[in-house]
């Protein structure tokens, strides 16, 4: 019973983080006309407030900056796709079934 309770709380917490991140990210990118240092700073703050963590946030920002340079992003909306890809790359190694003993 405890495992289901913890699992449910984790699921609700992740859903809340996803909702906040998605809504605030849409707002952040929607009010920008260019990709600049201010955008990266605001994105970093957003990730930290969504409890992504300091190390993961630094990694994600570095990945997004690098991709934006390599692919010559011009539209802030392109940052959303880069963030999605960077999050997937960061989390996919962790996507394994949870083994719990009875």
Image: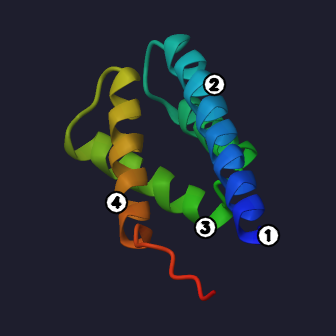
Q: Considering only vertical position in the picture, is 34 above or below 102?
A: above
Q: Nearer the viewer, residue 80 or 32?
A: 80
x then y, percent, for residue 13: 71, 47
Report how far apart the C-alphas of labels 1 and 4 lie in the structure.
31 Å
Looking at the rendering, which quadrant does residue 17 occupy? top right
On the rendered structure, is 59 left or right of 88?
right
Q: Is the C-beta separation of discs 2 and 4 under 8 Å?
A: no
Identify the mark nearer the N-term, 2 or 3.
2
Q: Is the C-beta separation of discs 1 and 4 under 8 Å?
A: no
The number of numbered badges drawn on the structure is 4
Q: Which mark is residue 89?
A: 4
Neighbor class of circle 2 (other Cα within 10 Å; few <14, some 14-19, many 20+) is some
On the rendered structure, is 85 left or right of 31?
left
User: What residue sits 58% from the left and 82% below the top?
Assistant: 100
Q: Considering only vertical position in the picture, is 50 above or below 23?
A: below
User: What residue sits 37% from the left and 72% below the top?
Assistant: 93
x then y, percent, for residue 76: 41, 23
Q: Which mark is residue 2?
A: 1
Neighbor class of circle 4 (other Cα within 10 Å; few <14, some 14-19, many 20+) is few
Report how far apart the C-alphas of labels 2 and 1 lie in the structure.
33 Å
Question: Closer to us: mark 2 or mark 3?
Answer: 2
Identify the mark nearer the N-term, 1 or 4.
1
> In which quadrant of the rendered image does the C terminus lie?
bottom right
At numbered mark 3, what does the secondary structure look like: helix, strand or loop?
Answer: helix
Identify the mark nearer the N-term, 3 or 4.
3
On the rendered structure, is 32 left or right of 84?
right
On the rendered structure, is 77 left or right of 71?
right
At numbered mark 2, what does the secondary structure look like: helix, strand or loop?
Answer: helix
Identify the mark nearer the N-term, 3 or 1.
1
Question: Closer to us: mark 1 or mark 4?
Answer: 1
Q: Which residue is mark 3?
A: 55
Looking at the rendering, which quadrant does residue 57 occupy? bottom right
């Amino acid at each position: 019973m405890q495992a289901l309770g913890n699992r449910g709380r984790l699921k609700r917490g992740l859903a809340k983080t996803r909702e906040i991140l998605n809504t605030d990210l849409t707002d952040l990118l929607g009010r920008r006309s260019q990709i600049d240092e201010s955008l990266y700073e605001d994105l970093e703050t957003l990730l930290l407030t969504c409890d992504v963590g300091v190390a993961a946030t630094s990694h994600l920002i570095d990945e997004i900056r690098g991709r934006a340079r390599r692919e010559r992003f011009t539209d802030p909306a392109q940052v959303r796709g880069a963030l999605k890809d960077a999050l997937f790359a960061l989390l996919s190694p962790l996507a394994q079934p949870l083994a719990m003993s009875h």
